[in-house]
Image (tube, rainbow, N blue to C red):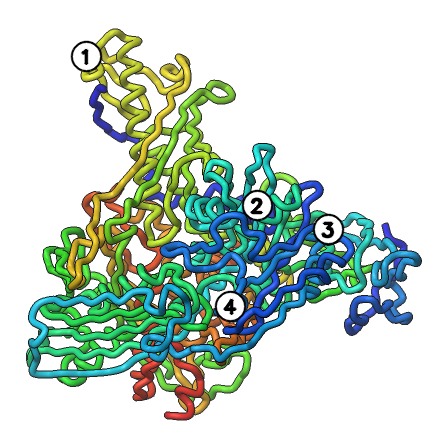
Amino acid sequence: MSSQPERLPRQPPPGTRGQPLPDDSAHAPPVAAGEPVGVLAPYELSVNGTVRRVVGAWVGESLLTVLRDRLGLVGTKGACEQGECGSCSVLLDGSVVCSCCVLAADAVGAEVTTIEGLTPPDGLSDIQQALVAAGGVQCGFCTPGFVVAIHDLLSTRPDATELEVREALSGNLCRCTGYGRIVEAVRIVQREREAVGG
Amino acid sequence: MGSSTVAVCRPSEIGADVRRPDGVPKTRGAFAFASDLSVEGMLFAKTLRSPHPHARIVSVDVAGALAVPGVRAVVTASDVPGAPTFGLEHRDQPVFASDVVRYQGEPVAAVAADDPATAVAAAAAIDVTYDVLEPVVDPEAALVGPALHPDGNVFRHLAIRHGDPDASGDVVVEGTYEVGMQDQAFMGPESGLAVPADDGGVHLHIATQWLHADRDQIAACLGLPPELVHLTLAGVGGAFGGREDVSLQIHLCLLALRTGRPVKMVYSRDESFLGHVHRHPARMWYRHHATRSGDLVKVEARVLLDGGAYASSSGAVVANAACFAPGPYRVPNAVVDGYAVRTHNPPCGAMRGFGAVQVCFGHEAQMDKLAAALGMDPVELRLRNALRTGDRLVTGQVVTGAAPVAEVIRAAVAHPLPPSLDDGLPMMARPGGAGMTADVADLRRGLGLAVGFKNICFSEGFDDSVAARLRLELGASATPVATVHVATAEVGQGFVTLAEQIAREELGPLDVVLADADTGVGSAGSTSASRQTWMSGGAVKQVCEQARRALVDRAAGIWGCAAAELVWLDGEVVWEATAQRMALAEILAGGPVEERCVHRHRPTTPLDAGGQGDAHLSFMFVAHRAVVDVDPGLGLVRVVQIATGQDVGRALNPLQVVGQIEGGTAQGVGLAVMEEIVLDHGQVRNPSFTDYLIPTALDAPDVAITLIEEPEPGAPYGAKGVGEPPAISSGPAVLAAIRDATGLELPRAPARPDDIALRA
């Protein structure tokens, strides 16, 4: 495991490509000497409970890019690159974020949880099962992001009303379903968890 | 061949809410979309696009790009070895612009490099000198102006003359209407991976709607025989028409052949907005004539579609727009002119609803105007004129199949209304939602109805076919396995589920494996025109029926009896005379059974000079009732509920049908209130999800659904397509509801806040 202390509050974007990270970013990896300008020294990210070494990354790479292109975790999708669609949703220290809008280097010291980390080794979580059963999956491109967002919602507000569910999921775009079956899937999980808990 | 009858004793697969087989990997994040593909040693590509909608290219200097370390190839028009142009209907679109650019975003060059960032940097280092010219962006001006392309400006003019052109009615209403440019906005960006093959050809893994049409265009432009260009469907993140045209396919193959290495490309979202065709913007003029009692006498219409810079499928889109311009009503006399023209706006082509959507805004606004002029209830007027089986369309074609127009209207208006405004409304459920702007006291509620229809499958004499192969054999632990091979593009619609359902319906309980969709089997046509349930579903059904006959023949050989003495019953062959049974596994112990077929629908005919002919196979009908809340002062709208009746023939998988209806409805609602590609002198001003808004979970309305199941003759199991109708009349119903709430004319979709607030 990384020996990094708790991560600092979110910094503003630490500069454009070719510029080193600000010195006050205690956890940011240093720029590697002798490498092309802008390439960072190898650094470590904690992803799904495992420390992963990131090699050859540029300073400005998003967490999404590092997860997909450097760590091979392609379950997290990219669709808008500006935090509008939620396809790239991951948990950062338990909170849902758009990984396209988080600098990977800024996630050093944090725990990153992706769709792969929310998926049981065999089978499906209750959220995933409900999405399949309710017809909440069509093309499926938005689905991993929805699984992450629903996980976050039901962890923090298990009793959310339908309107609250819709508001909570309104940062995740789906072009296929019109959301009806996705909202139904949330309802199914709420009922099942309530039955188990009650 | 022995004839066998089917007697299915177990619960039918058809009509069951079977879960989609790809649902598990998709929810796990383990389903491989085109953008997820990777292979050792692959390069990354980037396209350089024109920033100008109209310019002459003075020079293209790629030296700067080639000097960037890590760049492996740069290709321009002069590197295209075969045909310089491609296109779905007419090959009028250059692979790369060489002399003139005709729309903003037209590709000029492409680069392959060791990593994506290098490819982007290298594309930016290409030096193109443009002589910038004034773009022609007004379709009316293009219609009569100088040619913007050697092929001219009119993609197609379809004139429909039906009945007495001089007929007139006691009551006449007239109007002009407009529809803006909508984007498919599928979530998975365009992506592909091209791998050079040892035989000098190329293997492309691609997210597309129609593998074989892509292959033929790629092969022509590469100067290769089609058999050296192999395509495999990669995971498709939605399509909605936007993947029917070639985008990055030829560029990728060219770069792979040039470098001898695998090359991958993924469009960014802004590039996606520039890189695929859109829904045609429309300008429409209508004049309706009716008797005092409300019978339609004549419809006159002129529909002008802006096709943008290249033809794409404009010819077929405008044919639909003209054929369906009067709506699903009995219209004895009609004078309709449809035009699709070339401009310097972005190219337009297929999008869900394909020409029927645009005219529905026109004909339904006209029906409401007519009802008002007659002092008649708008529902009553529509019911009075609703098409029925046996009626004649304005193309002269008699509707021979199911035409439950009155039924879909009655079903839509029969749904209970949502709670009234008097019951209060939480802030999030008000127009403006999280903006917390609307006061309930200011809100006005409106109701609107719209009815639409559209053709299923390809029309006008197109040889519409699907090839299917089936292999039946014993798998592990000696259980029967059916491997189905079709080139059908699964784009999210759920064909993969239907294929399994149909195979089990026809062959009994067995494992069904769907082989990769690729060009190793014959064409399946496009996943468009709501046609794959009918066409690919029909092909799977047909090949399974052939296999059943082969199984019966084989059993007859084993027993030494005539095949005619045997029947197929519940997944077994039964010799009734001896009460002997032979299970599928026993028959397959003698070796696999392989069958192949090419499935076709009844032929259609071209339209003649007067737009007359049996051009269409079959029709789907739909009605929507919209309930909206409007804040007239702020111009904000919330669509509260859409109630719909939809003619589906038969729902093979009701859960998937509901998904198609809810999803298509959201796209229709989006076009009515928020979705438009904003153009300024040919420049796209909003190529992002920040600026091009699609409905969120809060914007999407509740959808109350009634399926009208009247089996369609000639369709497999009586099933019509279901994908497009939800997107046809849902938007017009919303506009009608906003008119009802505000009293405004609102002749244009989408109805933007300033259209409402500044005129209320």
The location of residue B651, given as percent across then percent down, is 30, 49
Instruction: Say which label, 1 or 4, has the lower sequence index.
Output: 4
- In 3D space, how far apart are the residues under numbered discs 1 and 4 (Cα atoms)? 77 Å
Question: Disc 4: which chain?
Answer: B
Name which quarter of the figure residue B448 lies in. Answer: bottom left
- In 3D space, how far apart are the residues under numbered discs 3 and 1 (Cα atoms)? 71 Å
Q: Which dot, 1 or 2, sits closer to the camera?
A: 2
Q: Which dot, 3 or 1, sits closer to the camera?
A: 3
Task: Classify 10 Å Cα crowding around label 2: few (below 14), some (14-19), many (20 and above).
Answer: some
Question: Disc 2: which chain?
Answer: B
Q: Residue placed farthest to the top in the image?
A: B560
The location of residue A112, given as percent across then percent down, is 74, 56
Secondary structure found at label 1 = loop
Instruction: Say which label, 2 or 3, has the lower sequence index.
Output: 2
Q: What's the amino acid at mark 4?
A: Val
- In 3D space, how far apart are the residues under numbered discs 2 and 3 (Cα atoms)? 26 Å
Residue drawn at x 26%, y 69% is B338
Q: Is residue A185 left or right of residue A119?
A: left
Q: Which residue is mark 3?
A: B114
Q: Is residue B412 left or right of residue B98?
A: left
Residue nearest the observer in this picture, A17 or A3: A17
Q: Which residue is mark 1?
A: B577
Q: Which dot, 2 or 3, sits closer to the camera?
A: 3
Do marks 1 and 4 share a chain?
yes
Q: Which residue is mark 2?
A: B31
Q: What's the amino acid at mark 1?
A: Ala
Tell me whether the residue at label 2 lies in contact with that at label 3, contact meaning CB atoms closer than 8 angstroms.
Answer: no
Task: Classify 10 Å Cα crowding around label 1: few (below 14), some (14-19), many (20 and above).
Answer: few
Picture layout, residue B722 above or below residue B755: above
Q: Which residue is mark 4?
A: B100
Instruction: Say which label, 3 or 1, has the lower sequence index.
Output: 3
